[in-house]
Amino acid sequence: MKRKALILALEHYQTDYPEEGIFISRFRSLLCNFHNCYKRDLVTGHMTASAFIIDQKITSILLTHHKKLNRWLQPGGHADGMEDIRAVAFKEGSEETGLSSLTFHHNSIFDIDIHQIPAHAGVQAHFHYDIRFLLMADKNEPLQISDESHDLAWVPIDEITEMTRGNHSILRMTAKLRCLFPDIISKKSK
């Protein structure tokens, strides 16, 4: 999903979440006005992609304990010049978990978010314009912790709030998951 396809996908992106509606115009502005928005050298903000990974039985979400941010988050990272944002999400998901069983649940955007990253190691505070995709993986496959993480964990869906300390964007994605699989998740939550 390269720049033109991403702009088109954002134009057609449907959401029940008001913050995502606001994000759409900011994404479009970034993509249409900054040729270097896929590179970190755009210091005000740049494109990133995430993999929201669920197990095949839809009982757990794979989170990484991010070293720099010291928080449990979904795997993801910088585009670093790569304009196929879907491929970036897959690459980041694979590199940060070591999983070879990753597959996209569907090809469309699952979630969008714009969040500020605090200043760190000489890099000023900036925004990540994050496109998220829903992926699935085999929960039994061994995980490999990357040098960007302290840990990786399959977190049961009902424990996401506590594990992420109520991270709003992760809770939004979890709510979307509950809507996408209402029969499966509600039965497993009892």
Image (cartoon, rainbow, N blue to C red):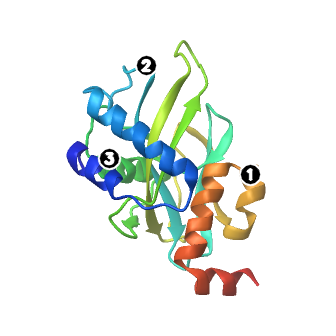
Image location (x, y in percent) of residue 129: 45, 38
Residue positioned most to the top: 122
Q: Residues within 10 Å of mark 3 (few under 14, many from 20)?
A: many
Residue at (61% x, 50% y) in the render: 169
Q: Is residue 142 above or below residue 64?
A: below
- Residue visible at 62% across and 54% down? 170
Residue type highlighted by circle 3? Ile
Residue behind mark 1: 166
Sequence order check, earlier mark of 1 and 3: 3
Label disc, if present, on residue 46 of the rendered structure: none
Residue at horizontal 67%, vertical 68%?
157
Q: How would you rate the neighbour count of disc 2 (Cα within 10 Å): few for under 14, some for 14-19, many for 20 or more?
A: few
Foreground residue, 107 or 104? 107
- From the viewer's perspective, tell me whether residue 190 is left or right of residue 112: right
Q: CA distance from mark 1 to mark 2?
A: 28 Å
Q: Secondary structure at mark 3?
A: helix
Residue at label 2? 43
In the image, what residue type sits under mark 1?
Answer: Gly
- In the structure shown, which secondary structural element does the residue marked by tag 2 occupy? loop
Q: Is residue 75 visible?
A: no
Q: Could you tell me which residue is drawn at 23 percent across and 51 percent down?
A: 5
- Distance between the alpha carbons at the discs numbered 2 and 3: 19 Å
Residue type at tag 2: Val
Q: CA distance from mark 1 to mark 3?
A: 27 Å
Q: Which residue is mark 3?
A: 85
Q: Is residue 107 above or below residue 40?
A: below
